[in-house]
Amino acid sequence: MSSTSDRVRSVLKQHAKLSVDAGALADHDDLYAVGLSSFSTVQLMLALEEEFNIEIPDKMLNRRSFESVAAITNVVDTVVG
Amino acid sequence: MSNAQAEFLKLLLEHGILIDMGVDGLYGRSGVFEDVVERFSILVAAFGKEDKAEVVRFPPGMSRSQFESSGYMKSFPQLAGTIHSFSGNDREHAALLAKMEAKEDWTEDQKATDVVLTPAACYPLYPAIAKRGALPEQGGLFDLYSYCFRHEPAIDPARMQMFRMREYVRIGTQEQVVSFRQTWLERGEALMKSLGVQVALDVANDPFFGRAGKLLSNNQRDQKLKFELLIPITSEENPTACLSFNYHQDHFGTKWGLCTCDNAVAHTACVGFGMERVALALFKHHGMDVRSWPRAVRKVLWGE
């Protein structure tokens, strides 16, 4: 089974409309610097919730939670528990 | 708080400054109220005069297809007002009248027209400017003024469903747009202080809908994209946003294909004046009789 961060990269590839290949991103690369917009973040949030069958709590719905593969992976791991 | 709002509304109605129309948030305006709005509008124009903005006026309705493209329904579906009309035949007309007579819902067969009520004065501007092609080197600066609609019925007289918004909109490079907003942050505060009201500037967010909205609101605040100039009207603790200063980044530029002279996506920003809110703040601070407003304030507004 693929790791959380691999699945995060796959969701990014499909939903984040980045200017680079999500598969080639380092864990801590700034996603906003490679084209993640506010509205794409919304699509990304909904896609992550579907992929991992989770509901991200309101307090995590902020810019920092989606800033990198590592940050997103951390959010998913925290919510999945 | 809602008690204070109801009391202020009652006072405005009793003094004939606003006129009840039977729906929360929909009011007639007296000549006195309109004069204050008009004088404030002239004052705003005086503060912005040196920038030589292009004046553009749109009616309070916009094209439904442009409204759909604007993405407004993604963010504020709860606030939008669409215009529907009857488009049936004689038999359907008779059925409609029968339902109306029986006090049943007669609106279900109304069909959406091509017109949507304008939610913010600048919404019809972006597609119109995009049609002109790339912006000149100095970018664009526009002066807008329109009635707007937002579906949020409330007792608070400062939360009207139909109200006027005056705006300056800057379209250009990031530097041009950010500098415009900074200029107006300073001007706006000076302008309102000259009217003898208590002001506070704060970071703000738009009322985005739902959980996705929570994320958009937090993003907007984190990036300080929206500031509001707050003035207490019916509450000291929750003052009312009377002016707003918004930096949209490249959101509208990308959406409408607005280009700078070197073919980069244009950035946009606007300063918006809630005309009724400002007038209400003045009535609240200075009293219901404009003739007894402080001399300094009368001088700024009426030059006397």
Image (cartoon, rainbow, N blue to C red):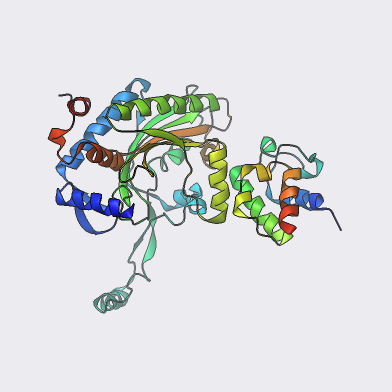
Q: Nearer the viewer, residue A36 or B262?
A: A36
Answer above or below: position of B78 versus B290.
Answer: below
Question: Position of A12 compared to B289: left or right?
Answer: right
Please identify the quarter of the rendering in which residue B142 is found.
top left
Answer above or below: position of B75 versus B129.
Answer: below
Q: Residue at x 30, y 74 (%)?
A: B96
Q: Residue at x 45, y 50 (%)?
A: B67
Q: Nearer the viewer, residue B87 or B233?
A: B233
Answer above or below: position of B133 versus A6.
Answer: above
In the rendered image, the residue lying farthest to the right is A1
In the rendered image, the residue lying farthest to the top is B50
Please identify the quarter of the rendering in which residue B299 is found.
top left
Q: Nearer the viewer, residue B193 or B117?
A: B193
Question: Position of B219 compared to A9: left or right?
Answer: left
Place of residue B178 in the rendered image (x, y in percent of width and height, measured from the top left):
50, 27
Answer above or below: position of A51 versus A21.
Answer: below
Place of residue A75 in the rendered image (x, y in percent of width and height, measured from the top left):
71, 50
Quadrant where the image shows the C terminus of chain B? top left
Place of residue B233 in the rendered image (x, y in percent of width and height, measured from the top left):
30, 43
Q: Residue at x 41, y 54 (%)?
A: B80
